[in-house]
Image (cartoon, helix red, strand yellow):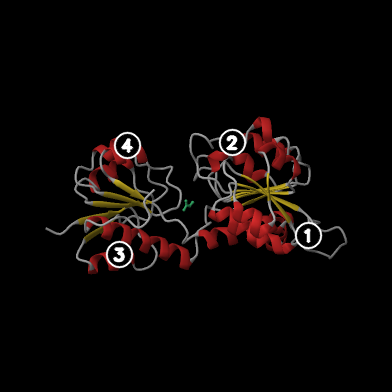
Amino acid sequence: MMKKIFITRELAGNAETFLSQKGFKVNVFQKDRAIKKSELLKEAADADALITLLTDKIDRKIIDSLPKCKIIANCAVGYNNIDVEYAKSKKIVVTNTPEILTDATADLTVALILACARRLGEGEKMMREGRFKSWKPQLLLGIELTGKTVGIIGAGRIGFAAAKRLKPFGTKIIYFDRNRREKFENELGAKKVTLNSLLKKADIISIHLPLSKETHHLLDKTNLKLMNRNAVLVNTSRGEIIDEKFLISLLQKKKIFAAGFDVYEGEPNINPDLIKLKNVFLLPHIGSATYEARSGMAMLCAKNVASVLSGKKPVTPV
Ligand code: GLV
């Protein structure tokens, strides 16, 4: 009997072909939208493996409906959408896609920072709306990176790759993490500081944490207000790490210079107050959206699935 793999949405690259050529039966959800829970319960019921996305909430109910499933391969580095402990208790392996998307996400972080610091969103909108009438000395003045302090919250792989890109702009790096990160200190001359101290001292703040109970609203009313008036805050990790409503109130009162969002609390829904603000730059969760990263992520999922279904160890278990 051919082993069945269910994929919740069409992936980038050649992962499906790779799995078919290995002799697996691959079913892909055909609609161009996130699969609904009721559809997933039905479609995945007899699957030996699942390839899921960050938009699929894999909770106890779903896991209980997968009697044959050996592996859930999440096509993302984050896996807060999956009840990992429960899956493990049911002997289902969970994998993610680390490393392959590090450079893409770090590139996007720098793009967001520059977009905020140099007001690219406002400039682009002005051009499209035909409002550029004359060059003037005070048109869209922004902030330079040279000489500024960058604060990295979450000093893992992506945090490091972002900091490494930002250092040659002439910035000083500080970081906040549970652990001491020698790579930050030795390669970038970065100093480990407390979260409050980072928020007070940094001109550019970038978040690179996984979402968990501990990091949910890690940035909240008590500490967000420590940021300085010229601070730029960007988030390419998970929206729920910031108390978004409170951050919006700071932006409305111009308590910081700007914020760049690739992720949102409750995405894809977006707080309408955010859209009204000029001092934000908004992207639709595209941190890893390069041909290289997305095809690599899909292939890594396929390799994890092929490995586990052949009785071998997963490549990147969580
Ligand atoms: C994207 O957000 C990911 O976790 O891979």
> Given the image, on which type of amino acid does mark 1 rest?
Thr
In this figure, which residue is indicated by the disc labeled 2?
Answer: 218
N-terminal of the two: label 2 or label 4?
4
| Type of amino acid under label 2 | Leu
Q: Earlier in the sequence, mark 1 or mark 4?
A: 4
Q: Which residue is mark 3?
A: 16
Looking at the image, tell me whether mark 1 or mark 2 is earlier in sequence order.
Answer: 1
Q: Residues within 10 Å of mark 2 (few under 14, many from 20)?
A: some
Q: Residue at x 30, y 64 (%)?
A: 16
Q: Secondary structure at mark 2?
A: loop
Residue 86, disc: 4
Single out the mark in the foreground, 1 or 3: 1
Residue 146: mark: 1
- At 29% from the left edge and 55% from the top edge, which residue is drawn? 313
Query: Any atom of ligand 1 within 8 Å of the CB at mark 4?
Result: no
Residue at position x 57%, y 44% from top?
179
Quadrant of res 273: top right
**Callout 1: SS:** loop
The residue located at (50%, 40%) in the rendering is: 266
How far across and how far down the image is residue 250, in percent? 71, 37
Locate the N terminus by quadrant: bottom left
- Is the residue marked by circle 3 packed among few (<14), some (14-19), or many (20+) residues within 10 Å? many
